[in-house]
Image (cartoon, rainbow, N blue to C red):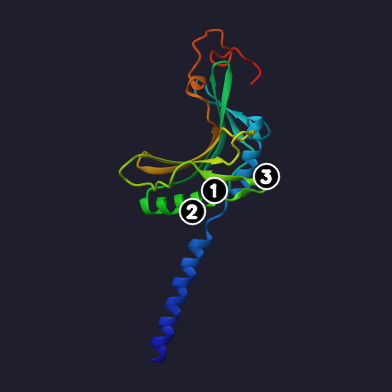
Amino acid sequence: MNKNRMLFICIICCLSLTAFSQKSSFTTIRPDLEKVINDYPNQFALIKGEQNQAEPNIIEYSSKVEMKGAVETKIIGFPANKKINWLWEAKLFVTEDINELKKQYKAYYNDILGKSLFSKGANNSIRPSNTYSAPSEELRLWSNQFHINDATGEFSKLVIDLIAEYQNFEWVVYLRVYDKEKDEEMRPSKDTNDPWRYGTNKNQ
């Protein structure tokens, strides 16, 4: 009886340690996200690393801010209407398991949500743009967006976008930070003299 009881206790302890290990494996991204947000008014100029090879009409840099555990981080520029729209992106993780996707995606969502920026105070907390939408196998693309509680300030157009996308039989989760422009400002320019669109600008 005592042996059975000891065995039962050992099993419970092992299960508890495993659960604790899985729960404690998540690392907060808040400090690194704040670094990215703080450089948003500068169009991420201070955190740009080396320039990378990119597709035509796209400018790409590595990011000096690298989130722990992320597969890749980069800064992408999309030339349009004589300006460049900049986007910071982290590929957070890749998985084939839909249950793992749901768990990790919600953990990142909760990590981003609600807290005030460390350097900005309570008036600049991160808020969801809509109610939470959980990923499922029914759609190949899911997105939950956040904004900063800064209606008239320099962060009023900032968007934080947590995306789950099904690619090549895997789920890929991205975190993106960018400026929400009006539709007419985002459209590619038809002006052939536009140096950003047609590659004649040398000061990228």
Residue 36 lies, in percent from the top left, at 62, 39
Residue that extends furthest to the front in the rendered view of this protein: 152
Q: CA distance from mark 3 to mark 1?
A: 15 Å
- Frontmost of labels 3 and 2 is 3
Answer with mark 2 or mark 1, whichever residue precedes in sequence.
Answer: 2
Q: Which is more toward the observer, 157 or 135? A: 157
The residue that label 1 is drawn on is: 112
> Residue drawn 48% across and 62% down?
22
> Residue drawn 47% across and 23% down?
183
Residue 88 seen in this snapshot: no
Residue 104 seen in this snapshot: yes
> Badge 2: few (under 14), some or many (20 or more) residues near its Cα, within 10 Å?
some
Residue 120, label in figure: 3
Residue 150 lies, in percent from the top left, at 61, 38
The residue that label 2 is drawn on is: 107
* Secondary structure at numbered mark 3: loop
> Badge 3: few (under 14), some or many (20 or more) residues near its Cα, within 10 Å?
few
Q: Amino acid at mark 1?
A: Ile
Answer with mark 3 or mark 2, whichever residue precedes in sequence.
Answer: 2
